[in-house]
Amino acid sequence: MNDPTHVPGDRTRVRRVATNAHYDTATLHAIIDAAYLCHVAFGDSLGVHCIPTACWRAGDHLYIHGSNGSRMLRRLQESDACVTITHLDGLVMARSAFSHSMNYRSAMIYGRFEVVSDAAAQRQAMEQFMGRLLPGRQAEVRPGSYKEYAATTVMRIALDEAACKVRSGGPKDDEEDLSWPAWAGVLPLVQTRLAPVADPACTVHAPAHIAGWQQA
């Protein structure tokens, strides 16, 4: 099932509950593509930081963006970082406190970010970001100006060094706990889309990509 070309290294080899590890490209891409946010961990002279930021994938890279003055973006050009994404799918209720767990899909990506310096590539990446947020939106909004693009840094990190960890299914109680009179099972959790809420000053009729948000 796992892609044999993605052999884990010292940083990506899952050691705790290794049976939940996945190193294949398909699992990694699916976890990234289901996310709107990632957490980027890096260090500087003030210590170690972990900052949430918007993310998207294009090909074999994960992209982020921000202001040219961002401390994080400057530091990411100087040293390696670790990017994490987690989707929580359920709380696993076992018959003993020790055996409780969670169902989840997670990914960790290691490496060095690089700046997308080519102006055309930067614009393309930002349009891909808009398409990730909401397909069809790019054609509706005012395009970014030269000044806005000049004030924005777009960065990407290769997905070459990454590992995923996934848990699904019910509780795994010890044999001696199966007769304990406590409810056992899974409390599922999902991300739910709600109805669009228009800006009070908006007089534009909702286009299809907005009106269909809740049903998508």
Image (spheres, rainbow, N blue to C red):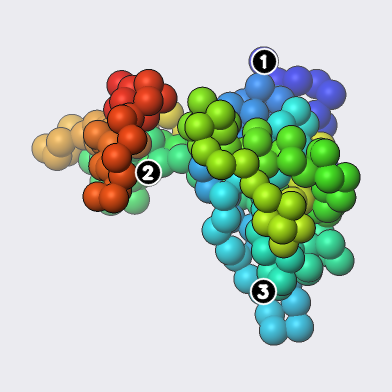
First in sequence, mark 3 or 2: give its number.
3
Q: CA distance from mark 3 to mark 2?
A: 28 Å
3 and 2 marks in contact (CB < 8 Å): no
Q: Residue at x 75, y 20 (%)?
A: 3
Residue type at mark 2: give it.
Ser
Residue type at mark 1: give it.
Met
Q: Residue at x 31, y 44 (%)?
A: 202
Q: Residue at x 53, y 48 (%)?
A: 37
The residue labelled by disc 3 is 48
Which percent across, then down, holds residue 95? 23, 40
The residue labelled by disc 2 is 101
Q: Residues within 10 Å of mark 1 (few under 14, many from 20)?
A: few
Q: Residues within 10 Å of mark 2 (few under 14, many from 20)?
A: some
94 shown above or below 69: above
Disc 3 on helix, strand or loop?
Answer: strand
Mark in the foreground, 1 or 3: 3
Q: Is residue 133 visible?
A: yes
Residue type at mark 3: give it.
Val
Disc 1 on helix, strand or loop?
Answer: loop
First in sequence, mark 2 or 1: give its number.
1
Point out the image quarter for the C terminus: top left
The quadrant holding residue 158 is top right
Q: Is residue 142 left or right of residue 25?
A: left
Q: Is residue 175 visible?
A: no
Residue closer to the observer: 121 or 103: 121
Q: Residue at x 56, y 33 (%)?
A: 138
Name of the residue lying farthest toward the bottom: 46
The residue labelled by disc 1 is 1
Q: CA distance from mark 2 to mark 1?
A: 25 Å
Which percent across, then down, holds residue 145? 68, 50
